[in-house]
Image (tube, coloured by chain):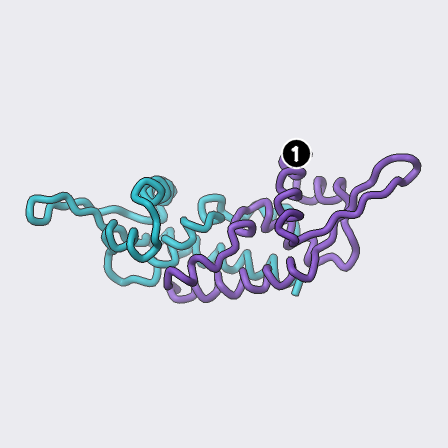
Chain colours: A cyan, B purple
Amino acid sequence: MSNAEFKQLHPVLTERVRLGIMALLAAEPDAVSFKGLEERLGLTKGNLSSHLRKLEDAGFIEVFKEFVDRKPLSTYRCTDTGRSEIKRYLETVERMLKLGR
Amino acid sequence: MSNAEFKQLHPVLTERVRLGIMALLAAEPDAVSFKGLEERLGLTKGNLSSHLRKLEDAGFIEVFKEFVDRKPLSTYRCTDTGRSEIKRYLETVERMLKLGR
């Protein structure tokens, strides 16, 4: 494994919670609500929020905010950038780790 | 992706530097010196030390300490546990992320 290859692992993706969020959103054709993510990942609201923010800042996910029954509802969707970064992450990890098997 | 699957991602491995160290050591039949890791990963001594300690505590690598020309020399090697955890990590990441492609 070269130094350059190692540096290709996007830092935003090398974290368990963020990888979990991305895997979940990338597999969903529809946007997923905050509550849905919270339940399926078993995370606290604060922890989930802070990771969602990082993924949004990186442009990997997008958030839609609307009002449903006068209550605010946030839903999240994987962007095209997010999908291509996931693909690149997987390819890099496969290339890096398969050498050692 | 299920909650159980998400939890299978070993926390010690979901960090870029540690993944890099493991990839490097798993690909090497011989033990690698601290200096060798430092140069190949382009990390500072302090950063590298702290991640090596976490990998050692998890049983994924083992360290050999000896004296060469009266100077202490530490070398590192991937353990069988480390190899099987890398395999499991790769399988989990592939299963999680391929759904979204």
Dividing the picture into quarters, in which one does residue B49 lie?
A: top right
Mark count: 1
Q: Mark 1 lies on which chain?
A: B
Residue at (71% x, 44% y) in the render: B37
Nearer to me, B35 or A34: A34
Q: What SS does tag 1 mark?
A: loop
Nearer to me, A30 or B26: B26
- Is residue A58 toward the left or the right of residue A93 in the image? left
Image quadrant in which the C terminus of chain A is located: bottom right
Q: Which amino acid does label 1 sit on?
A: Thr
In the displayed orientation, state which residue is furthest to the left.
Answer: A69
Pinpoint residue B53: horizontal percent, then vertical percent: 65, 42
Residue at (45% x, 51% y) in the render: A16
- Is residue A51 toward the left or the right of residue B87 in the image? left
On screen, residue A82 above or below A45: below
In the displayed orientation, state which residue is furthest to the right.
Answer: B69
- Is residue B91 toward the left or the right of residue A99 in the image? left
Residue at (31% x, 57% y) in the render: A40
Pinpoint residue A43: horizontal percent, then vertical percent: 34, 49
Q: Mark 1 points at which residue?
A: B44
Pinpoint residue B69: horizontal percent, then vertical percent: 93, 37
Residue at (62% x, 36% y) in the render: B47
Dividing the picture into quarters, in which one does residue B52 lie?
A: top right
Pinpoint residue B81: horizontal percent, then vertical percent: 65, 60
Q: How crowded is mark 1: few (under 14 residues within 10 Å), some or many (20 or more)?
A: few
